[in-house]
Image (spheres, rainbow, N blue to C red):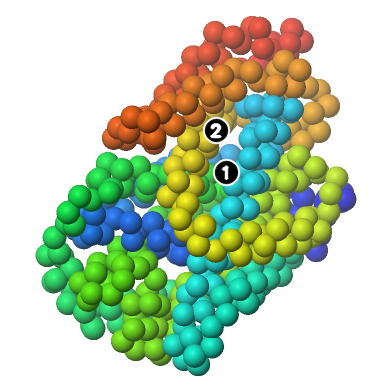
Amino acid sequence: MSNSTETISHDSMSPISANERTMSLFSTFFLWLGSNVVVTTVFTGMLFVPDMTYSTALIVIILGTLLGTIPLILMGNIGTRTGLSTMALARGAFGQRGAVLPTAVNTIVLIGWSWIQAYMGALSLNEAISYLTGYSNINLFTILTEALVVLMAMYGHRVIETTEKFIVSFMVVLVVIVFGYMFITFDVGNLIRMTVMDNPSITVSAAFDIVIATVFSWMLMVSDHNRYCKTEKVGMVGTYLGFSVSTIIAMVLGATVSGFSVLNHITRTYDPTVLIGHFNPVFGFAAALVIFISVLSTNTMVLYSATMSYLAIFKQHHFKKIVLILGVICIFGALLKDWLLTNFQGFLLMIGSLFIPVVAIMLIDYYILKRKHYDASEIISGENKLYWYSNGINYVAYISFIIGAVFAYYFSYVHPISGTTILTFLLTCVVYAGLMKVARKALVPEENKESEVV
């Protein structure tokens, strides 16, 4: 593989061939185990307690994660089957030109994710250093956190794959220590018996939607990594187990820290560093390492995917240079600090409104309309215009997206109802499949009608 985006690790838009696949079941599991034990997911778990009982929060987190991960592994499987990155695959459904808009938005959203994670990770590190030494400099630690992420991401997926095993192993040990310390120091029985707060801001159905939306936030990144899986079974099993376990651990950690902080009359927090450091600075530092290492792990994957998304539009640009440029943007964005936390929940809902319809369209297009077949080389080159639709744009996909996005926005913000996330997904699937069947003859050029399978 040789083109202008090639790097030491051969990261480019070109399909990954079978002999370049390096991810076994073990490495796939570890990659996705490290994906979501991250500060933003921990923060999400904090939102649920004491708005609902601890037991209810656990049920919502587990069920929402296990259900939401199903479409995640289906999306990742397209990458494994084709060898293509996620936003390159968007061309199959949206058209060669039509995919530019969702790809650009995805790049911007991933940069936003990197901002939030870098700042929240730096908060934990700053808290821990402050406990141990008295030194505090949040701006310095924010820059340091994101600079390390950029350094790791610059060397591509193989470096990510290799380092994840060591990072995750260390992180799992620290997670066990943090949970162990909390459950030994604080009374778990009190946490289970803890009553719901007056006038809770998040209902059970809203919490379920947030869990699903958190999973969906990974949908437009998963194929960037799973295109390196050796087999479909490896990709699907490793991703489902790793991602489910990581999400459940992170959200349960957030719910647990929130509950214990309230019970111990400490300012409600998602951060185990604050809770544990209040009683034991050494163990608080261990908790900070969990958060810091998780940010390095996840944010490297996010920055890598942001770069691949960018290259899906500007494939002639150089991978390493784009990582560096986007990384600098992420450093400055992370310095927005408290503004990021204030707008985090709205950010999650925005992702649901924008990207759940995109995911639904891509899954239906590949698995139902195209019957599990994309011509990977044609998607990249566009020479034969197999995915050209009308002037390079699939207007049916855009109509379906608008219907799904408007539905998600209205029933999330204007007139909230239960299950908006799942309903948006199902509605968009039905609308897109139906409209494509009706419009197929108008959309497919005469010379391609015989080869088009619906």
The spot of residue 30 in percent (x, y) is 51, 65
Q: Is mark 2 on a helix, strand or loop?
A: helix
Quadrant for the C terminus in the image: top right
Residue that numbered label 1 is attached to? 220
The spot of residue 181 in percent (x, y) is 30, 82
Can residue 426 be spotted in the picture? yes
Query: In the rendered structure, which amino acid carries the disc numbered 2?
Result: Val
At x 50%, y 42%, the residue is 351
Mark 2 or mark 1, earlier in chain: 1
Q: In this view, does 81 lie to the left or right of 30?
A: right
User: Along the line of sight, which residue is nearer the eye, 152 or 383?
Assistant: 152
User: Along the line of sight, which residue is nearer the eye, 66 or 329?
Assistant: 329
Query: In the rendered structure, which amino acid carries the disc numbered 1?
Result: Leu
At x 59%, y 52%, the residue is 112
Splitting the image into 4 quarters, where does residue 263 fall? Answer: bottom left
Q: Classify 10 Å Cα crowding around label 1: few (below 14), some (14-19), many (20 and above).
A: many
Work out whether 98 lies above or below 104: above
Q: Do the residues labelled 2 and 1 touch (CB within 8 Å)?
A: yes
Residue that numbered label 2 is attached to? 358
Q: Is residue 46 left or right of residue 99?
A: left
Can residue 169 be spotted in the picture? no
At x 66%, y 7%, the residue is 442
